[in-house]
Image (tube, rainbow, N blue to C red):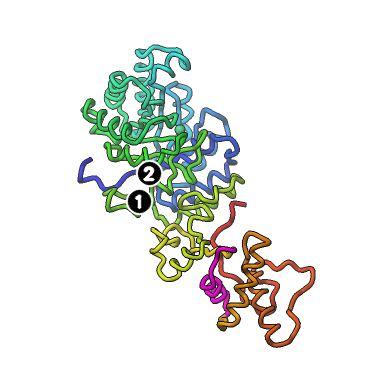
């Protein structure tokens, strides 16, 4: 890895690979909203779609290209004239258009899927890149199933597409089969065997079939890749792509080991994750790293006590760094007195020692019946304890389910939790 390079390019494919997954298709207006958020997020390139796939896809690429001006806007095309013409027309209005042409290079794909010879594949790759260059100088070539391709042949293809004018060469682990040490060795070998490869940006596109997409992307960069393809919430074909938020936060939290960073504004991560979830109607897995609703939640008493004393005891990054306003202490039956006291203070109630004991006991009893105790319910307990101590009836409103403290006279509204639970 060259010491001079300390930035890795983020190529976001949420709107293309991500959108291809069942249940994740998006309408044009939704794609545009996400593209604008990806712009705020600071990704280097947005792959906006696969224009030959449908008229809607082509139109979405055209609109994103016209409206989102800072990042590169890429369109995908097979190495076929009609695909490239359609994609070229779709990105023509972009401030920074990129054409992304691809063809499979593994024998399995060539023989069983495309039913062409290696020589025909090589010719199609060269012709595809040359044609794409008529539309834009920024041409990316992908060797689909690169990690299962015969190395000698793959190197010939890479050498040829660089000569034909590709400035980025993407080597996908299309089926999520590789292991991190293999990926690192693979990229190193390409750079060692193909002199032309060091004149272009090598890119990784890793899938998560074995849960290794982010680890493999990091390994690819160690091996010499300078662009990583990823998606918000890790969505994508099958088990998905490398998760943008995970890759970016690894390079930030462990900058000491990674030695490089990205241009992503991490405070926009949570907003992007929530927007995608709302738009697609697909909730984010609760324990998803970085953006899941439990990612910064602490329920166990020992953990809550530690976090309240010093967050670094159980948090390796601050929730604000990724756009989550603050940690969420989930009150449940494992919670301690300290957490109850802190939550009450956050809700504007300072309790005496006696009150804390009383509220705590009732909270535990309530948590035995239901999983979690919401802010509104906690405030109801506080009011009941105080009313009993004063000899007056508890201010309950029969039949009214208290949510978020709004049903209690004079109770302050709860602070924003920052989690939308993905609609
Ligand atoms: Mn893919």
Residue at (27, 37) in percent of width and height = 224
- What's drawn in magenta, residue-wise? 333-349
| Residue 284 sits above or below residue 24 on the image | below
- The quadrant where residue 102 appears: top left
Specify the farthest residue to the bottom.
390
Image quadrant, ligand 1: top left
* Cβ atoms under marks 1 and 2 closer than 8 Å: yes
Relative to 224, say whether 401 is above or below.
below
Q: Percent x, y for residue 178?
A: 38, 31
Quadrant for the N terminus, please: top left
Residue denoted by label 1: 263
- Residue at the right extreme, as displayed: 398
Is 22 on the left or on the right of 15, as rendered?
Answer: right
Q: Label 2: which residue?
A: 10
Asked if residue 343 is among those painted magenta in the image, a careful observer would answer yes
Q: Crowding at label 1, few (<14), some or many (≥20) Cα neighbours within 10 Å?
A: some
The residues bearing labels 1 and 2 have C-alpha atoms spaced at a distance of 8 Å
């Amino acid at each position: 890895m060259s010491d001079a390079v300390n930035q890795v390019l983020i190529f976001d494919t949420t709107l293309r690979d991500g959108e291809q997954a069942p249940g994740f298709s998006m309408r044009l207006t939704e794609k545009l909203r996400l593209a604008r958020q990806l712009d705020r997020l600071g990704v280097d390139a947005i792959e906006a779609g696969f224009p030959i796939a449908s008229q809607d896809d082509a139109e979405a690429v055209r609109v994103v290209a016209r409206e989102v001006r800072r990042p590169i806007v890429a369109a995908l095309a097979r190495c076929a004239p009609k695909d490239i013409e359609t994609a070229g027309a779709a990105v023509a209005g972009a401030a920074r258009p990129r054409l992304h042409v691809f063809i499979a290079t593994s024998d399995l794909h060539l023989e069983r899927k495309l039913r062409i010879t290696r020589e025909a594949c090589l010719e199609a790759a060269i012709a595809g890149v040359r044609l794409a260059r008529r539309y834009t100088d920024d041409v990316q070539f992908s060797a689909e199933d690169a990690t299962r391709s015969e190395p000698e042949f793959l190197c010939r293809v890479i050498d040829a597409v660089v000569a034909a004018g590709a400035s980025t060469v993407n080597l996908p682990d299309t089926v999520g089969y590789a292991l991190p040490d293999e990926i690192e060795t693979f990229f190193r070998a390409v750079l060692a065997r193909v002199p032309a490869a060091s004149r272009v940006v090598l890119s990784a596109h890793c899938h998560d079939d074995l849960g290794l997409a982010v680890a493999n992307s990091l390994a690819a960069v160690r091996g010499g890749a300078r662009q990583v393809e990823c998606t918000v919430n890790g969505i994508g074909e099958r088990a998905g792509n490398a998760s943008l938020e995970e890759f970016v936060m690894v390079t930030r939290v462990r900058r000491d080991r990674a030695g490089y960073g990205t241009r992503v504004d991490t405070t926009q991560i949570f907003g992007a994750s929530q927007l995608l979830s709302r738009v697609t109607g697909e909730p984010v897995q609760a324990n998803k790293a970085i953006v899941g609703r439990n990612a910064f939640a602490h329920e166990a008493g020992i953990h809550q006590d530690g976090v309240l004393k010093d967050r670094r005891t159980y948090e390796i990054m601050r929730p604000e760094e990724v756009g989550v306003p603050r940690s969420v202490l989930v009150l449940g039956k494992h919670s301690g007195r300290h957490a109850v006291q802190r939550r009450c203070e956050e809700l504007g109630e300072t309790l005496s020692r006696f009150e804390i004991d009383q509220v705590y006991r009732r909270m535990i009893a309530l948590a035995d019946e239901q999983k979690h105790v919401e802010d509104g319910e906690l405030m109801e307990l506080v009011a009941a304890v105080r009313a009993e101590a004063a000899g007056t009836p508890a201010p309950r409103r029969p039949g009214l389910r208290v949510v978020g403290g709004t049903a209690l006279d004079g109770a302050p509204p709860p602070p924003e939790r920052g989690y939308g639970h993905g609609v």
